[in-house]
Image: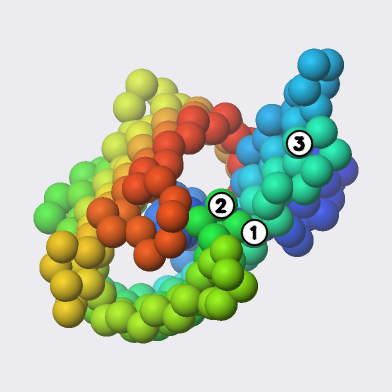
Amino acid sequence: MKKLIEFFWLLGLSLGYSQSIINTESILKDIDSTSTINFNIEGDLKYGNIKLIELNNQLTYAKKIGGNLIRLSLGQEYLEEDDEKLANDWVGQARFNHYLGLNSIFAFAQMQNAVSLNLKSRYLFGGGYRQNLYSGKKDNSNYFDLSAGVFRELETYSQENDADLKIKNWRYSFSAFSNFNFYKNFSLNTSVYYQLNSANLEDARFFVEPRLYYKLNNFGIYLTNRYRYHSTPYVPVKREDQEYLFGLEVSL
């Protein structure tokens, strides 16, 4: 087990996703009264007619201090095809929740890049309110929450003429989060984000990630689907991305 944890730690030092939204919701089900470290690894290796290496990793640290919760997350997506590096994307996020019973007010900051989206850099900071609508079981591990907030968005995109495109927006953010345990060690954790440009409501972003878990003690495997949609891309990229991933997770 020690060697496995060290393996995840080395991979966890390089983490993230090319998506413009990072999801730290799944770690909530593992947080006890003190702190939790969560490692995720997802990968795809192919050799033969095509040589493909794809690794997605995420390291998240969460700590409770009284009625407050702090989450720090670092991530990377690496993609290489036929010895050509296509992506080496990084993302980091800090999130703070102050709990009012089962509800909370929150603040966050995020920074990242995403080669697949021609996104050289993205900086976010904002906050909002999260309302619990359903809570089941004594440990509140089954829940359904809604949240609303606002954040500042500073983006820099690369273009074919080498002139960077700089975007500055305020966005409204609406989210839904849920976790439901069923049939022994299985659970379904789902996050949905809907974000609107405050100056142009037709500029919308949508992200959904359902994640099916099978967990034994501190070790788990999961299958997840990530779907991202941007109604008005700022550079010539597709409006939507979708991926299915199989992952391993260790919690300490």
Give the position of the N terminus as an image quadrant.
top right
- The residue tagged 2 is 116
Q: Earlier in the sequence, mark 2 or mark 3?
A: 3
Which circle's residue, 3 or 1, is located before the other in the chain?
3
The residue beneath circle 1 is 89
Between label 1 and label 2, give the one nearer the viewer.
2
Measured as percent of width and height from the top left, residue 162 is found at 61, 73
Q: Amino acid at mark 3?
A: Glu
Residue type highlighted by circle 1 = Asp
Report whether residue 201 is seen: yes
Quick check: can you spot residue 138?
Answer: no
Instruction: Name the side, left or right, on which 56 lies relative to 124.
Output: right
Residue 225 shown left or right of residue 141 in the figure: right
Secondary structure under tag 1 reads strand
Callout 3: SS: strand
Say whether disc 1 or disc 2 marks the residue closer to the N-terminus. 1
Q: Residue furthest top?
A: 48
Residue at 17 percent of width and 79 percent of height: 199
Instruction: Measure the alpha-carbon separation of dots 3 and 1.
Output: 15 Å
Q: Is residue 55 left or right of residue 169?
A: right
**Contact (CB < 8 A) between labels 1 and 2?**
yes
Which residue is labeled 3 in the image?
81
